Image (tube, helix red, strand yellow):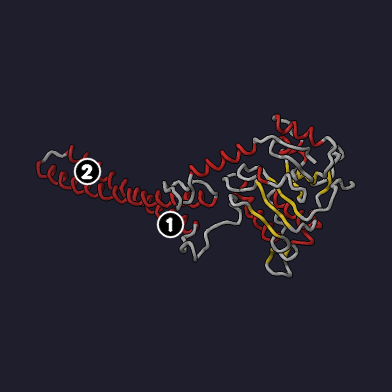
Amino acid sequence: MTSTIKQKRDRVAIVGFAGTSRHLAPYDDDRYEIWCLNEAHRQSWLKRLTRWFQIHQRWDFTKANNDAYREHWEWLKEEHPFPIYMQEQQDDVPSSVKYPKREIVERFCQNYRRGRSLEDSEVSEYFTSSFAYMCAMALYLDFKVIEVYGFEMATDTEYRYQKGSTEFWVGIAGQHAEILIQAECRLIQGALYGYEVSRMINRQRLEFLENRYTGERDRAVKDMNRINGRRLENDALHQQAKRTELKQTYAIRGRELLQQEIRSNAVVNEKQGRANMLKDLIATVDNMHAGKDPGDGFYGPEGDLDPQLEQQRQTEAEEAAQEPSEGPLA
């Protein structure tokens, strides 16, 4: 396919769906190419574009189980004045172009290998998101400025596993071009280990401790049940005893067993409390890594997240995205 891009530029804005910054892309600055993906052509905030990416398999972009997918497939079948990069060129997608994955891997991934030794290893192809393919393509086409808008990878959905690859390609890109990440974006962002945060216990150890106290709780429950069984048996014997001295013996033993059962119940509760605490800590760690509210009740300017500020940002971004579109998508 002959290129329909009118001029060679050395700046590109890669635009995703996140409302925090998608509307901030330089749509009105002709020095930039604007790249977008998937069903975003339906959105009013996308004011201009020069290349499109639809990297999913054919069954995905041809499905018609809702209005968005049906409209997307009809849009793909139209002829557009820009390339649409896909896994393979599709005859019924006139603007489709095969994504040059093999050439990109040969150029940028040869030093990233997996195996027991360099001699016995394979090149690691690390693409777990559409952004990874888009960023790699920007490198392949020798763009000197790469700006990122509308990508957060912050929610605890598929984005959680996609974030590593996204940051991997941003890292490679930074060796060849200038990279701009929006201030609101959580990519390649975190407290400086050793400088701003203390050494932290890792999730694996928290899991180990939770399993340890859960096991100790289970053993304590068995011990409590054993004592309870002995006490109930003793109570039955107390009821059946005819002689006064024998009933007194069973009564004394019953009180002793009751005290043992109370103490064993306290042990069960203590082990359960420790296991619950560790389970909550694991959930807090997972939420922090996912960019969500840690769930520990601590908010404010020094907290991990300020829910009110987050909501304010999102509302402002959505309002800004509603501004009327100007100019054609070209």
Q: Residue at x 57, y 40 (%)?
A: 316
**Is 151 on the left-hand or right-hand side of 27?**
left
Residue 207, position in %: x, y?
47, 55
How many numbered callouts?
2
Measuring from the top left, give residue 173's x and y in whole percent. Answer: 71, 59
Residue 138's label in the rendered image is none
**Residue sitting at the far right:** 2
Where residue 138 sits, quadrant-wise, is bottom right
- Badge 2 marks a residue whose secondary structure is helix
Judging depth in this view, the residue of 133 and 299 nearest the camera is: 299
Amino acid under disc 2: Asn
Residue on which the image places disc 2: 234
Q: Earlier in the sequence, mark 2 or mark 1?
A: 1
Mark number, residue 209:
1
Q: Residue furthest left?
A: 244
Q: Classify mark 1: helix, strand or loop.
A: helix
Q: Position of residue 179 (x, y in %)?
A: 68, 57
Q: Is residue 170 above or below residue 60?
A: below
- Give the CA distance from mark 2 to mark 1: 37 Å
